[in-house]
Image (cartoon, helix red, strand yellow):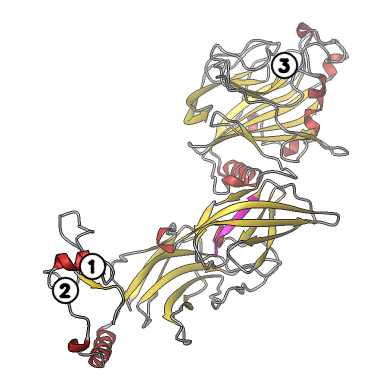
Amino acid sequence: MSLLIFLLWSVCLAHVESLTISDFYPFGEDRGDTTMVKNDDGSSPNIPISTKFPYFNHQHDKLIVSTNGAISFLTPVSQYTPDPFPLDGDRRLITPFWADVDTRKGGNVRYRETTNLEILERASNEIKSNLPAFYRFRAAWVFIATWDNVAFFGCSSTGCLKRNTFQAVLITNGQHSFTIFNYANIEWTTGTASSGNADTGLGGKPAQIGFNAGDGKVYYVVNGSRTIDIVNINKKSNVRIPGKFVFRIDSSEIGGGGCNTKGNVIITPRSGPMLGGQHLTFSGPCLEEYTSFKIKFSNTRYTLICEMDSPYSFYCITPMFDSTGDVQVDIILANQNKTDMFIGNYTVLNPAFSKVLVNRHNGNSWENDEHNISWNGNVKELQNSSTVDHQGTSIMSMRTCSAKIGVCFFFFSKSKEENGEIKLNPFIAKTNILNSIGWTTFRLKMTEQVAILRVTSRVQTAFIMPQRGIWSDMFPVTPSRTNASLFCKDWIKKEGSSPKLSVAEPCPCTLQQALLDIVKYQPDPDCNMLHVGAEGRGNCRYRRDAQHCVRLTIPR
């Protein structure tokens, strides 16, 4: 079955200007570009690239820049009239503007690869803002090809005054790859050899913009390709910036930016910790400057106010949840004239299965002493996102643990209401830590037995939000000798008031009887034959000579 991928959703934005050269990625020989010799229908030699570039599920270590507005990976492109995609014959192409360019009549074609940190940062930010699902993307390599003020083949003295300027930017981190097309002035579409008009550069078989896998099956074309309307490409966009298009191109399905008034909402990440504090990005819906954002998780009582993250996305901070599993997310977007409703899904994870983002060093036996932790300071949860300084106050029942960058411990204790409820109680261990270092030392001093650690930042937003932060694993705190002695004495005291064995339920005569009586007895989770170590030993840490223990289902 042939796979056809085509027709990019794009809009023509009225009363707007297209990009200018200043909006392009910097180019020119002073930037290290190679300038192709003046030619008609020519191509660069094979250009070895310093990283593998994923395109249509293939990895490429070279590419070729064509004068005629194309980048190829397998064979050069000398064809001046664009045949409609899909094309076979190993013509694996990226075509920002495939048409009959003739630089002998005017203009230049330039290209370079770069790992310049400023360029990589700009590319990373463009991908993250236009494709919010890749909010953690960091570019490692960029290739920039620019067709600067180029003329068309067969132009008359009048026609040669008409010029096109456009740019293709290839971006990858080695796993995912993207392309940005930038268009400034676009004044012609067709050379005379493609039946175009020598004075206007219009008519005939106009330019084609898109992507071709080279197998005759898989392709993607931008609306207006091979029609007169392609001359307006600098007024169109799939990211609501006239003259700019952004695509993900590493897989067989080319994906673009854009928005919708009905349809899917992308929630990134798709799942997160039950304890909350996670930065969630929502993309898909069309956003206006004065849009307000609210969301509600189906398993909470709260409606959360969110904040715009970019022209294409908004974000919220997750609260603490009362349960785990899949939950529905109701999304309300409101502006001056209307309210739109969207529905998404999110998975709440048990802390035991959540990704650990704060690493405890030598964490097997933490006691009241000095300890080291580390974390990734680039995560969204530790980045302030607004200019309004507001101390983060959680709307959850637990108290706030607030600092610019701080280490907070949350310990578990039974509530005073004697209802068996376990509460999470915070205290600040250290504040004002330099986040960029991603490491700190502090002294642990607490009497509780089970705790979890959060690195948190003060939330600076225009609205009250749940407090953001990243979590460690949940861990036991090794008691001091004094506390251990007190614990034992307290245990002995309570045991002394327990009922005598004569009035307690008699023990079963054999292990087999206990295993059969599943109503009264169950395996001890700390000592049973069901969990055997790698060396064939049991897990009876506190009963070294035992192989399997049972306990009453309902303690007496």
Q: Give the image location of residue 289, x and y in percent.
A: 79, 53
Q: Give the image location of residue 173, x and y in percent.
A: 51, 39
Tell me, yes or no, whether the highlighted magenta stretch contains residue 163: no
| Residue at (56, 70) in percent of width and height | 404
- Examine the image and state in which quarter residue 107 appears: top right
Residue 385 appearing in the image: no
Q: Are marks 3 and 1 in contact (CB under 8 Å)?
A: no
Q: In the image shown, does 509 or 249 lie closer to the viewer? A: 509
| Position of residue 62 in the picture relative to residue 196 (left or right) | left
Q: Judge whether 360 appears above or below 130 on screen.
A: below
Q: Nearer the viewer, mark 3 or mark 1?
A: 1
Q: Residue 508, which numbered label?
A: 2
Residue to which mark 1 is pinned: 517
Residue 545 appearing in the image: yes
Q: Give the image location of residue 363, x and y in percent.
A: 32, 66
Q: Amino acid at mark 3?
A: Ala
Q: In the image shown, does 143 or 363 lie closer to the viewer? A: 363
Residue to which mark 3 is pinned: 99
Q: CA distance from mark 2 to mark 3?
A: 88 Å
Instruction: State the SS at label 3.
Output: loop
Q: Judge whether 447 appears above or below 552 on screen.
A: below
Q: Amino acid at mark 1?
A: Asp
Q: Amino acid at mark 2?
A: Pro
Q: Judge whether 50 appears above or below 126 on screen.
A: above
Magenta stretch, residue numbers: 277-282
Instruction: State the SS at label 2.
Output: loop
In the rendered structure, which disc, 2 or 1, sits on the residue that comes first in sequence?
A: 2
Q: Are marks 2 and 1 in contact (CB under 8 Å)?
A: yes
